[in-house]
Amino acid sequence: MNKPQSFFHLHLISDATGETLLAAGRAASAQYKDARAIEHIYPLIRTERQLAKVLDDIDQEPGIVLYTVVDQDLARRIDEGCAAMGLPCVSVLEPVLLVFQSYLGTPAGRRVGAQHVLDAEYFQRIDALNFTMEHDDGQLPDDIEQADVVLIGISRTSKTPTSIYLANRGIKTANIPIVLGVPMPESLSMAKKPLIVGLIASAERISHVRENRILGSTPAYDARAYTDRANIAEELAYARQICTRGGWPMIDVTRRSIEETAAAIVALRSKAR
């Protein structure tokens, strides 16, 4: 018998965007299947006045407090405020910074939002995102040679979200749908630079995802054929044929998250170099 799901408040205080905290908080929360976090995110908290309002909010809805604040006076204020309320709080970066300090023999510079500096790497990510959005779902196939990665696969194999995730890591990613009986663009077989990867999944998973997708009604749309597992199995066989003929690796995304699929693609890129 499944336990009823409980809820708890998770307060995330950051002097930057809060992305690091959100990732850490969700990674920890995911380990508790019967408890769901109600997230309260407080980004760009850099003054005593801003922090006072945050602590008032926390007092109204007590819970776990995680923070990444490099200003030590503000960090101390958070610790003291949470202690007064009897709430647990953790500086997520502090233990990591102490390890770095111990190993490198020098204290951290404690720069607010240092990971978001507008450097070459930042602009590389922006460039990759622009490229990926312009080359989504088979658009601009003649530019394939400019891509770092090309994802191919039948409908509902997570090509677009995986492409965007890779782009956020600075990897220019195009994706091209595989449609039963329709040949792939000639530019794909001619491409030399990009890593081409086929995404596949079980017919059961794809059918389930397609059933839960709301599609616009068009004259050519046949809902029954689109979700039929026999038809999907035929599409998958066609996709495998194309990948085998091209000598392109395939990744089964049936039980993989977007992050795991992206990690497997990054590993393939490293091997291919």
Image (cartoon, rainbow, N blue to C red):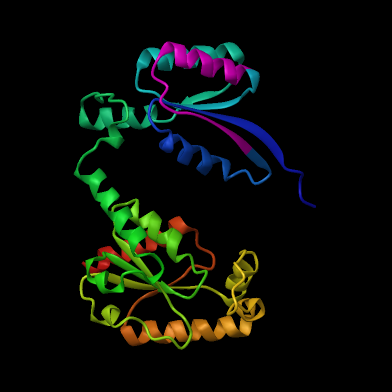
Nearest the viewer among 103 and 88 is: 88
Residue 257 falls left or right of residue 100: right
Inspect this view and state whether residue 82 appears.
no
Q: Is residue 41 magenta?
A: yes
Inspect this view and state whether residue 228 appears.
yes
Residue that lies at the very extreme toward the right in this rendered image: 1
Q: Is residue 185 above or below residue 268?
A: below
Q: Quadrant of the C terminus?
A: bottom left
Which residue is painted at 62% across and 85% down in the image? 230
| Residue 53 position within the rendered picture, expressed as x and y whole percent measured from the top left | 52, 15
Q: Is residue 237 above or below residue 101?
A: below
| Residue 51 position within the rendered picture, expressed as x and y whole percent measured from the top left | 47, 16
Splitting the image into 4 quarters, where does residue 118 fall?
Answer: top left
Residue 21 falls left or right of residue 63: left
| Residue 263 position within the rendered picture, expressed as x and y whole percent measured from the top left | 38, 58
Segment tinted magenta in the rendering:
37-59
Which residue is painted at 71% across and 38% down in the image? 6
Q: Is residue 200 above or below residue 53?
A: below
Which residue is painted at 44% across and 28% down in the image? 43
Nearest the viewer among 52 and 97 is: 52
Splitting the image into 4 quarters, where does residue 64 fall?
Answer: top right
Q: Is residue 66 magenta?
A: no
Residue 35 falls left or right of residue 112: right
Splitting the image into 4 quarters, where does residue 197 fall?
Answer: bottom left
| Residue 33 position within the rendered picture, expressed as x and y whole percent measured from the top left | 65, 46
